[in-house]
Image: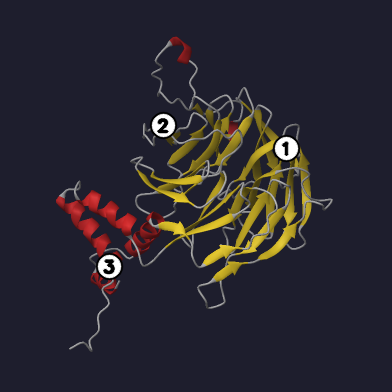
């Protein structure tokens, strides 16, 4: 670390390289945290998680019994051993709670004073965090599998809603009404995600095996229908382009918005270029996925290369996005994992599943075996200039503290 700071002072490396290198090391070496945990309060499986983007302090979770929980993640005790306590709860027996399973939760992107939930009772609720009561409620024809609000939108307050009907609904929080119906899918819609780069770009996935990209300013038809064969179908029957050979139940943009990952019940994860709509043909192998509901997975923020954490049955698989290399498998849940969320400030992962547990995955700072193995394999492939760059990264990981008092 001292040597790296000297390199920064001398102008040999950029200051941002420290952040990138440390984030990469932590992302590669996640394991079940030994010193911190989440207070166990759930009485049913946990379907959805979200961390507030303003402070990174609060973890919101939704359960299969309709209850909601908020935990405080910050540790001010001065001890590494810490349990994140429950600070707010909406019990399933309350009149204002969801009647059935909560399928999706999200903090309001610009203020932790609001959060949004939806579920199998066909309702979307806007909650006031201060009093833990709904400020507004929207009812729909179908069961809601996922909703999403853009984290960068400045000119609108639109919430996209994917449900058991064959169109996407857009709810305007300012007017309190549904403003758009995006019609293009032929079956139930399972997932929807706004682009983190273009505030009007929306991606949707459905039981018709399709992934559609929309510009909501011109919603008469979609911009693109993603084709897994890039327009080169193998037979006449494949003239109708589909993104997967099964239901599409998971979507996630990279944080720069340049790529989109889709997850399907054909046991495949696919990487797409946002601008061209082409399948990047990255092979992640077979990833078991038989869940007929939305699956929440997430991507690292500032690591290089970027990693994706994908829930599959009772496991969480780690892959390099661009190469498709499987880095590691996180084992800790006793039942199916439903949700993974990556904390952008702490560089750690939270996961939840049907075993009623919310687990914390963090890096053991005394070990860097996975990342060191990655550097070693890359060192053997890279040209001399790139090899020197990797060696600089290695120096970041090394403990170069020394004592001037040694004889």
Q: Nearer the viewer, residue 273 or 298?
A: 298
Residue 110 in view (yes/no): yes
Precedes in sequence: disc 3 or disc 2: 2
Q: Are marks 3 and 2 in contact (CB under 8 Å)?
A: no
Residue 200 in view (yes/no): no
Q: Nearer the viewer, residue 399 or 304?
A: 399
For the residues labelled 3 and 1, the Cα–Cα distance comes to 55 Å
* Image location of residue 18, percent across then percent down: 34, 64
- Residue 178: assigned label: 1
Q: Is residue 200 placed above or below 20 in the rendered structure?
A: above
Q: Are marks 1 and 2 in contact (CB under 8 Å)?
A: no
* Image location of residue 108, percent across then percent down: 64, 54
> Tag 3's secondary structure?
loop
Apparent side of residue 314 relative to residue 66 in the rendered image (left or right) = left
* Image location of residue 4, percent across then percent down: 27, 69
Give the residue displayed 52% in from the left and 35% down from the top.
289
- Residue 16: assigned label: none
User: Would you call the spot at circle 1 few (<14 residues within 10 Å), some (14-19), or many (20 or more)?
Assistant: some
Apparent side of residue 203 relative to residue 307 in the rendered image (left or right) = right
Q: Which residue is mark 2?
A: 276
Q: Nearer the viewer, residue 31 or 147?
A: 31
Apparent side of residue 215 relative to residue 286 in the rendered image (left or right) = right
Q: Is residue 235 placed above or below 55 in the rendered structure?
A: above
């Amino acid at each position: 670390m001292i040597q790296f700071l000297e390199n920064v002072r001398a102008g040999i490396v950029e200051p941002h390289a420290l952040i990138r290198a440390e984030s990469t090391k932590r992302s590669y070496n996640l394991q079940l945290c030994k010193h911190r945990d989440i207070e166990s309060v759930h009485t049913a499986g946990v379907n959805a998680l979200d961390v507030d983007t303003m402070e990174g302090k609060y973890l919101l979770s939704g359960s299969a019994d309709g209850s909601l929980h908020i935990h405080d993640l910050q540790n001010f005790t001065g001890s590494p051993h810490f349990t994140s306590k429950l600070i707010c709860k909406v019990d399933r027996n309350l009149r204002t709670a969801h009647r059935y399973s909560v399928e999706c939760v999200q903090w309001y992107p610009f203020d932790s004073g609001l959060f949004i939930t939806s579920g199998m009772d066909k309702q979307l609720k806007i909650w006031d965090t201060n009093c833990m009561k709904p400020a507004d409620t929207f009812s729909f024809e179908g069961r809601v599998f996922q909703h999403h609000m853009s984290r960068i939108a400045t000119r609108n307050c639109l919430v996209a809603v994917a449900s058991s009907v064959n169109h996407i609904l857009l709810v305007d929080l300012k007017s309190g009404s549904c403003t758009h119906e995006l019609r293009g899918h032929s079956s139930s819609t399972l997932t929807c995600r706004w682009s983190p780069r273009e505030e009007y770009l929306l991606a949707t996935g459905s039981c018709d095996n399709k992934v559609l990209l929309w510009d909501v300013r011109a919603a008469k038809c979609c911009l693109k229908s993603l084709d897994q064969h890039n327009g080169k179908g193998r037979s006449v029957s494949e003239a109708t382009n589909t993104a997967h050979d099964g239901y599409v139940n998971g979507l996630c943009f990279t944080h720069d918005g340049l790529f989109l990952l889709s997850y399907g019940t054909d046991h495949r994860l696919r990487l797409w270029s946002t601008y061209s709509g082409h399948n990047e043909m990255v092979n992640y192998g077979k990833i078991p996925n038989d869940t007929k509901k939305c699956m929440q997975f997430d991507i690292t923020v500032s690591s290089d290369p970027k990693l994706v954490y994908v829930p599959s049955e009772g496991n969480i698989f780690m892959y390099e996005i661009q190469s498709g290399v499987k880095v590691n498998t996180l084992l800790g849940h006793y039942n199916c994992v439903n949700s993974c969320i990556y904390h952008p400030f702490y560089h750690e992962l939270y996961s939840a599943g049907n075993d009623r547990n919310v687990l914390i995955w963090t890096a053991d700072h005394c070990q860097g075996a996975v990342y060191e193995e990655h550097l070693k394999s890359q060192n053997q492939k890279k040209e001399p200039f790139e090899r020197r760059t990797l060696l600089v990264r290695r120096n970041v990981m090394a403990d170069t503290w020394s004592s001037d008092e040694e004889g």
